[in-house]
Image: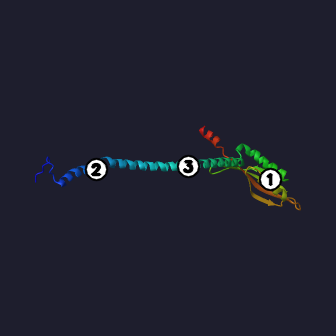
Amino acid sequence: MVIDLKTGSMPQYLKIIFIVVPAIIFIVLAVTLIFSPKNKEIKRLGDSITKLDNEIKTSEVKVRRLDELRAENTRLQAQLEELKEKLPEEKEVSVLLKQVSDLGHKSGLVILLWKPQPRKPDPKGIYVEIPVSMEIIGRYHDLGVFFSHISRIKRIVNISNIKMDSGAKAGSNLLKGAFTASTFSAVDTSVEGTASKK
């Protein structure tokens, strides 16, 4: 079969093929070379936008909590200052122990023994326990008043190893008592740091 292209006597199906095939090739090339890479780029940018949106949401949550965290920090700082008041510095310990002795006299007790014991450092290095052995003579009520005064001191003072007997004069209402009064001192890290540098 001979096809005459000049005369236009081409069969209909060949005309359709000549029109459709180049269009299909053009569409396939356009999809392969232009649209497919652009779709990958669009998907990559979409994933990047989603990731950035998630980061923005996380940051917004953190910003909303920022005021709450600042308030919590302020509260904890105030609590720390309050706790520091209960834990005297090393230079304040002697004043505190004198105050304990004065409270004993004020309560009507006679102090027979006031003997500082060796200091006991905390294993974590936060504080040092400073115990003092005490022996007193006084009435039971006076001893209760003394312990009541001790409980109202702002600083921490623990009373332990309490031993009481009526070993005073027979027939009297006096008690002889022995106990350990312990206070605690904050370890001054700045002094230790200076000493270690030297």
Q: Where does the image place residue 6, in percent across and percent down from the top left? A: 14, 46
**Mark 1 or mark 3, which is nearer to you?**
3
Instruction: Give the quadrant of the C terminus.
Output: top right
Disc 3: which residue: 62
Is 65 situated left or right of 119 in this image? left
Q: Where does the image place residue 7, in percent across and percent down from the top left? A: 14, 48
Q: Which quadrant of the view contains residue 140? A: bottom right
At 64% from the left and 43% from the top, the residue drawn is 189
Residue most extreme to the right: 171
Marks 1 and 3, how far apart in space? 48 Å
Rendered image: mark on residue 6: none
Q: State if disc 2 and disc 1 touch (CB < 8 Å).
A: no
Tell me the amino acid under the disc marked 2.
Ile
**Above or below, 5 relative to 197:** below
Disc 1: which residue: 149
Which comes before the other along the chain, label 1 or label 3? 3
Q: State if disc 3 and disc 1 touch (CB < 8 Å).
A: no
* Residue 126 visible in the picture: no
**Crowd tier of the residue under label 2, counting other residues whose Cα lies within 10 Å: few below 14, some 14–19, many 20 or above:** few
Query: At numbered mark 2, what does the secondary structure look like: helix, strand or loop?
Result: helix
